[in-house]
Image (cartoon, rainbow, N blue to C red):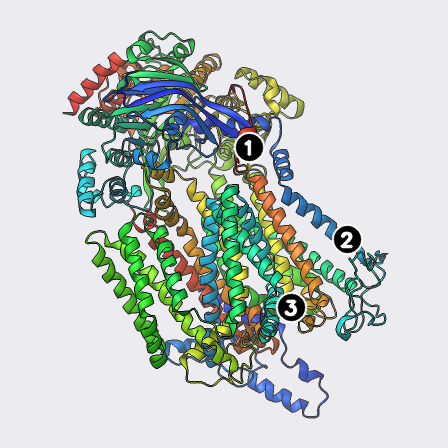
Amino acid sequence: MSKDNVLEISDFNVDFWVDGVWYPAVIDMNLGLAAGKVTAIVGESGSGKSTTALGLMSLLASNARMDGSVKVKGEEMLNAKTSVLRSFRGREVAYIFQEPMTALNPLYTIGFQIVETLRSHFDMGPKEAHTRALELITMVDIPNPEQSIFKYPHQLSGGQRQRAMIAQALACDPALLVADEPTTALDVTVQAEILDLMRGLKDKLNSAILLITHDMGVVADMADDILVMKDGITVEHGTADQIFNNPKHPYTQQLLGAVPKLGSTKKRALPYSESAKPAPVLKLTDVTIEYPKRGRQPAFTAVKNFNLEIYPGEIVGLVGESGSGKTTVGRASIGLLPVKGGSIEIVGKEIAGADSKQLSSIRRHTGIVFQDPASSLNPRLPIGESIGEPLYLAGLAKGADLARKVEELLDQVELPRSYRNRYPHELSGGQRQRVGIARALALTPDLLIADEPTSALDVSVQARFLELLQELQGKLNFACLFISHDLAVVDILSHRIAVMQNGLLVEEGDRDQILKNPKNDYTKRLISAVPVPDPKEQKIRREARLATKK
Amino acid sequence: MNLFKRKEKATGEILAGGESAIANKEVEGLSQGQIVRRRFFRHRAAVGALVVLTSLIIFVMTALETKIGPIRIPGWWKWTTEDIPALRFEDCPGGTTGCPTLSLNPAGGFGLGTHPFGQDDIGRDYFALTMNGARRSLMIMFVIGAVAGFIGVVVGSIAGFYGKMVDAVLMRLVDFIQTVPTIIIAAVIGKAAGKVGPLYLALFLGILGWTGLARLVRAQFLSLREMEFVDAARVAGASNIRIAFKHILPNAVGQIIVSITLIMAGAILTETALSYLGFGVVAPDVSLGLLISQYESSFTTRPWLFWWPGLFIISIALCVNFIGDGLRDAFDPRQRRRITKKDRLQAKLQSKVGA
Amino acid sequence: MILFGSSFMVYNLAAYASDPLAELRLSNDDSAQQQIAALTRQLNLDTPPPIRYFLWLRGLLGLFVGNLNLGTTRDGLSVQSELAYAIPVTIRLVLVATITAVLLGLALGIISALRQYSRFDYGMTFLAFLLYSLPIFWVAVLLKEFMAIQFNNFLSEPNIPLRWMIIFSIFTGVFWGSLLGGERRRFWTVFGGAFATNFVILWAIDFTDWYLNPGLGPILIALLSVGIAFGVTAISSGITDIKARNAALVMAGLAVVWYYPAQWIFDNYGSYLTVFVLLAVLIATGVFVSRAFSKIDRGPIARTAIITGFICGFLILIDRIMQSWKEYSATDAVNYRPVPTFGQRKDQLVTEDFWLNNLDIIMHLILPTLALILISLAGWIRYSRGALLEVLNQDYIRTARAKGLNERVVITRHAFRNMMLPLSSLFVGEFVGLVGGAVITERVFGWQGMGTLGIKAINSYDLNLLMGVNLLLSFLVVTGNLLADLLYSALDPRIRLRK
């Protein structure tokens, strides 16, 4: 901890007041950050990492209380006078937040918001500020800077918005950049670009970066030093090399163990022979799905000429970025969306054009697990009822019989039987997703569709969930369409992979073949953009990727 | 739609810092309904209002005689609206007649006297009149609430659930009714229906007043319809009816109840306003609004004729409003009290929370 | 489209519900039969209502060929002219009330939201609830009694009793204390200050019998102007913005300097045109002054300067109007009971004096406007409080703070504009709603506006008049909704500019 650190945190404590009790959120944190270096704070939700980031410059809610010392360039920030705090905010310490759509004021142009930062800290006239803003926007590689400076946030794409945020943050040449999950809301290819940008700018401007994230791949890509937090306590602190290659604390080891690493799983055989394929469980032939015209918005073709077959007992991973159409395919496959052209067959029966009775009987062969544990269960029903609903509606069980079956299902997903009468709000996200599986498997389906089931879960919870899914699949031998944007997760689970982009099926094949030897350009780009949780390897990958870009 | 939801939200941490994980501890083992009830009872003003309102209702309803068909339940008040006892003029200021005998002055004797609210022009007991008027108004308020509530929920849910054509048509209907200036049409109806009886007036007013609620219900349905558990139910084989009643409606109930209380508060004000103008409840029936309009000119000399009905209207409306606000907070809680310096000093430090 | 439908429905409803011949049928007069026949002929009562509707419609469509004919009322007057007379009356009443209610409600709501859960906030919320639950006719009558009759009585023997002074000062003290203060000490300081100031003012008023000859006078105007200059600068540009502050002070100074010349202008050229011209001059001066103070960045300075100038100018105007008070009270029509309870103006008051006229109009406006304001205020306090609270929870407010912007800018620039977005369309809706709902106020105070016309129409079963009123009101509602939508799309760049 040298004196000329840009950021010096000692014995930092944050507590929150709730109904007469102080709950600790950050406990005894110590950190030193020098110029030009990147320190990453990693942890799962509830670990206190975001609280630390916001607490630095006293940006927390009024029921927070902070203790200890936070020094930026030698100046104490905690309990400092408002004028001091304000002069440092934005000028020496700048923030980049997770969701640029909500973090930028929708009523002002991005140019205005950058100019505002400049003029509140420097004595600049409007013209001068405008020129500088233009410089910044060009520096962050936003296309058409002269026009973009007059655009509103909603007129830019997600990646461009984040760039605008970065431009705003860098406006005053800050000594410290605090980035709170800056790329979590972005697509993987865009994420890679933003990380490149941040690295480049850091080198150019010699600013220090405090990076808050849960993604170990991003950490491996960017960080020099790492701090691991759990429940407010700093569990381990060391260089990237130390942490990744020689983790000491059991939690760190567990965390690293739970992170899915691309290309690390053994070869997997298909559960059928290539030459004698059984009848497909799910068959999509030349499927086109369109979202109808809505007022002024024209009709939007989400999926075009899509072909895919899934055979019994295999897991097919469907990957793509946002807007690729993968969720649309998933929903259409279970009949939740109407199909404009082509046919979808489940165990040989055609869905498109089926009437409701036929549809119900077809659906008995399927189950679906949704993405958002918060909204996939009816908050007013005890989970036992949610799980039992498919059985009840199919007429397969009632009363005590139903209760027994529900208990069996709970056993299967390794939840205690007594949870039957609990409500969704009493369960954690991971537990709710297990309930989701239980419900999906209630009718012992032939086909399970999993729509991004782990995207909203913490890494360690995700690892347990994937283990469970694999076990169940092994035992019950259902076919699974696993939709995800996370290639590493898909890598662990699937036998085959299909890649989508802009509604089209871009490449499809055996898992190892796709991951190690992709043929399509987009697939190649996608795979190279995924950060792996190993600094050395990530460096090699990164350089390879940048080489191909040029 | 952003597929990359914040991890924080899924496991319960709001950016304000781990609060809701802590908050969830308090509601273990309780169903939604119980949680709401608990929260409501913490809201002192609302509970107070509830108590006041219930006692007021009981008070008013039982004061006079009630006739249900052939059954007559006697009230506890000695005068009825038909009695015309002699006009008192003793101790009345300024030579007026029929002043109230309510006396809270400990010196002169704490008591009700024969006519605590005074008497009207011809000598009828004002307390009886006020009670009668209050009863009318309360009844109308509840009827309007029920009618408007029912229509609003039905229309809103159909529009929100089925969408497209049905929605467009129903929204046109809502626009249509909203376009007609309420007072005018209510007055027209009131004039015609007032003669038939206050019940019909209430029905008509209810038929006019459901538009706001319908919009709300529709908005709720539209958003709830997109929820994943609805899709899950559909995949499980639920019919549309089941989805609407078992899945969507119970989740919208909170907003609906709050809306209905607000409609009721507005209803009593509208009804009394109409009666005041002469279009609502008309003589020989009694309404609080009517009483006020009849005696507004005598305010200077005999203020009691004016105060008492007004106070009743205000109390009822105020109580209903408070209850509505309490309900709203119970269904959708915001932050808790502001933290004062004293709170900060007094609060104890919780040892590490294993969230 | 909707207009047709609703008017059709109203017509039929009214027609079936009413029976203009009812009275006549009951009469035992000999001439009754003839009267019935005459009335039938006049009102076309022997044709069924739907057909009568189309007759009426034909008259309405005459609008497009420049020959609007909405029929005649029972009394034989043209419906059009009746409406034309009544509309401005109602609009005048509602406009002032709405604008004041909005401004006041916004201010109180914003302060409540900023000091959430403070005593002030609870107080305001309770107040809003109370006002919301008040029946307007009851309030109106109370106002009539206390503000008018009692006040007039009071004026005839003006003497503020000491205890009222104390009570009133306590109230003011509490209000300002909870508004500005937070911690104990500050609360009591502000309380003390407000109490003292208020008490002194009241005592001075009593001592000098100010209400007999009210006016602000140049000294008071000078003091107030300086205070206003500081206040406006604090909110609009921040107290540290020296240029803006100086510009505002210059404007205030100019206002004081203009006081005497203004009196001369007013006395000799009193008219709406004069006021308008003076307003234009004021704005021009504001721009000029800001130009003088800064070459770059004139916008905020000009804004501060103009607002200050506007308020100071307004003070001078009010002062002049107040000066007519004595003269006003002395006229026969008023007869020393200046607060009126009936009508829009005193018809007996015949005068050429612009100022007397306006004072008369204003006096008549006061009470009904006050009644309407009390009722609307509740809604606006709650809307603005809720809207601001919601906005303050948004991420971009946190970003603004993280950028190092001071709290004033965060609120006025970021929070305020976002909050106004939904409220602005609400404004139109409220205004339109109030036009229809001012019925009761009109009745209590005897104004001949739309509401009274409507009631007359219903009571006398005058279908033509009723249709006219209804048509106009519905038209307003539809236009209002349209306007509200347009306003929202114009203000929200997310709708205005699609990708």
Q: Which of pointers 1 and 3 lies earlier in the amino acid sequence? A: 3
Tell me the subunit letter for badge 3: B
Q: Which of pointers 2 and 1 lies earlier in the amino acid sequence? A: 2
Residue A501: percent from left, percent from top: 28, 30
Tell me the tag on residue B276.
3
Q: Which of pointers 3 and 2 lies earlier in the amino acid sequence? A: 2
Q: Which residue is mark 1?
A: B343
* Amino acid type, label 1: Asp
* Amino acid type, label 2: Phe
Q: Which image quadrant for residue A115? A: top left
Residue under the point 48% across and 37% down: A355
Residue under the point 39% across and 12% down: A252
Tell me the subunit letter for badge 1: B
CA distance separating discs 1 and 3: 50 Å
Tell me: residue C266, above or below residue C496. Answer: below
Residue under the point 52% across and 34% down: B341
The residue nearer to you, when weighing C70 against A516, is C70
Residue A445: percent from left, percent from top: 49, 22
Q: Which residue is mark 2?
A: B59
Tell me the tag on residue B56.
none
